[in-house]
Image: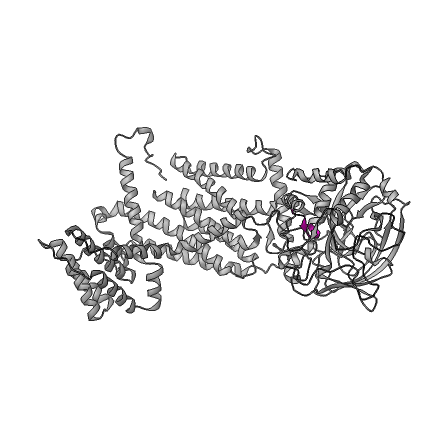
Amino acid sequence: MSGRGRLALCAYAATLMAACSMLPLVDPYAWIVQAAFLLAIQCGVGALGRRVPLPRAATVAAQALVLVVLLTVAFARQEALAGFLPGPQSVQRLADLLTVGADDVGRYAIPAPDTAGIRLMLVGGVLLIGLAVDALAVTFRSAAPAGLPLLALYSVAAGLSDGGADWLWFLLAACGYLLLLLAEGRDRLSQWGRVFAGAAAARGRGHASGIGAQGGGALAPVRTGRRIGAFALGIALVVPAALPALDSGLLAGTGGGNGKGRGGGTISAVNPLVSLQNDLNQPENREVMSYRTNSTGAQDFYLRILALDQFNGSEWRASTRRLKDVPKRLPNPPGLSPDVAVTEISTNISASPSYKQTYLPLPYPATEVRVDGRWRFEPEGRTLVGDDGETTGGAQYGVSSLIVQPTAGQLASAGEVPAALLREYTQVPGSLPKVVRATADEVTKGSANSYEQAVKLQNYFASEGGFTYDTSVNSGTGSAAIGRFLNDRRGFCVHFSFTMAAMARTLGIPARVAVGFTPGTAQSDGSMSVGLRDAHAWPELYFEGIGWTRFEPTPTRGSLPSYTLPDAPSGDSADPARPETEASAAVPVAPSASDSCPAQTGGQGECGSSALPGAAAPTDTGTSAGTVLGVVLVAVLVLLLPLVPMFWRMRVRARRLGSSTGRTPADATARTLAAWQEITDTAWDHGIEPDESLTPRKAAARVVRAGELDPEVAEAVHRVAGAVEQVLYAPEPRPVSGLAEDAQAVRAGLRGSVGRFARFRATVAPRSAVRVVWAVSERRAALAGRWRAPQRPAWLRLPSRQQG
């Protein structure tokens, strides 16, 4: 491989090693595999451009064009021209994904889910950094400035992470940068040697190494490179430490309004409780709020945080909406007709000081909110959002809300849904498995209207479809997870609510998913206590004349709405599909999750050991076996790569000292020279550079003197040196036995004469391992010589101006 080829490979490796610092920020790690593959293609285009050769600017431009094409194919293939060419629609798609990704990183806690937007930002960022590193280090032959983009990549990761293993990622990124510097230094030194050294370059490499170690001129650029590397690594340590702490999401900041505070005029939110994972992920069912209400139907008193109304195939999320000032009286709920019976109730809510949420939990639909602080109103979802850092921590507020009591007949005779609302809330991604629509059609066969379809879907999940409530199931909220849930029939609230909402949309029923809390547990003083395990998600379906209507497909959670029960008497709170509870004020209204709820549901808010109510954030498919295997393989390679010199040295030592005595003079000569070579390399590993200009006897004396060996070990060195002189110069060489044992004794003596660090370095990073690099270079030179033979056609010859 040419010098520029080695440099390109090192630039690729350095970029990936720096990109590994981003791994703790996102879960799962599959994005790094995609980034590595696309980066390899981009670097390969650069290598081809330099080999042609193209002008430097043209090479960089070609790589930039390939970068855009790769991102288009990976993230906007359906909108691209011919499936891969960037066009207006694909560019808009990428822009939309970047906007979504920017919203995601501002809302999710670490580790954030691998959403399409976040993945685009990660992969695109790695490709941009890789382009900059490859252009600086390889195309323009200046590796030192290439550390700046690598530093930027590491600094972002270090500034966002929680500091748990920053030193490991820093070490990995630093090794990548130093690898790049060393590759460039080797290439430059080899060029200087060809120009200035002349015939001296033909002298033994061991001698050259010895000269370099004594401070010859060749070390000047090496010292410069070391200083540059040390300076850059120092900056890499200082810059992240100077960054402000970011603790309110993957990137700091929460949505705000355009009022008096610093907030903006829109809110773009996903599940708001994801950012509280670290605070709420505790084993006990900690109380997050308590309330008192004059409602007589406490089993239907759900506290709603917000609605997730966009389904992009990989997650459900909330739309970007405009915020307004909170009116004294909230507008009437959308779609609610005066003919539907409603009862207005009052509730006083007190949030725990430790429960710091950007969204204010409210019963739906609220008509008036009395709360202090800086809050903004989002009309479409009827939610209140904190402005300028306002949260629910310790908040005490009063709410007036409506209990909407539609009859089955009113729901069955609901009017036609407005076209705009129907279009927005019935969209499903193209990635949604066909089994979703097929199952929805089968379950609702024979239904006369949308209401009957909705009830059949609810009953299918809650009681008739053989589904099991299981919080140990891998969360997943995207298209693939929905298909898997329908097949396995095991899951918890996010699976039931997301799947029913998706099915309803395929049937033409507007649907979204609400995130919040079930009513909680009644206390002896008449109040209700809401804990972590009351976190929940449920579907809301729209019926013209009634508005957004709650359904409950999750078995053993919450309560079935009375308007979905067959022949249920008015005001009867009994639930035939649920276990009955004794009439006691101290008995929970809604069943709680088991105390043994597993920790895998940490993002879902289903139990005390998890903290994320409703969780819309987890990844689509979880971590597949192939991804795990790939990540493990990459991790093993990364960990074992620094140990390659040690393993190579152990193998060489075993081969040299394990040879048999042999019966021919050639065997004796090979065995003797192998033992002497092992002693020479062992001394080199312990800091005694070889000097091939010396005779074996003088070299042995030098090893004894420099290593301060005791007389017994010194005798072993001289004995092997004498055997070498015998096989090289004696007319009839006499075989000498015990040379392998002598070499082992010399190794033990050298190890005993140096300190602990020197012994560690001699074992893990032996200096003599550089011989394998020399061997590869010699083979490459031999192959290159044959490649340049006169019989090779002229059109196959490498260009003289630019190689690699």
Q: Quadrant of the N terminus?
A: top left
Tell me where residue 529 appears, x and y as whole percent. 77, 64
Task: Look at 64% across and 39% down and name the residue there.
Answer: 431
The structure's colour scheme is one colour
602 drawn magenta: no
**The C terminus lies in which quarter of the figure?**
top left
Regarding residue 265, the answer to whether it shows in the image is: no
> Percent position (x, y) of residue 23?
53, 53
Bounds of the magenta span?
488-494
Q: Is residue 55 left or right of residue 566?
A: left
In the image, is 538 to the left or to the right of 26?
right
Q: In the rendered view, would you say 585 is above or below 111? A: below
Residue at 25 percent of width and 52 percent of height: 205
Write down the quadrant of residue 767 in the picture: bottom left
Image spot of residue 778 (x, y percent): 27, 45
Residue 436 vertical position relative to residue 230 in the rendered view, above or below: above
Q: Position of residue 684 (x, y in %)?
A: 27, 60
Q: Quadrant of residue 660?
A: bottom left
Q: Nearer the viewer, residue 511 or 706?
A: 511
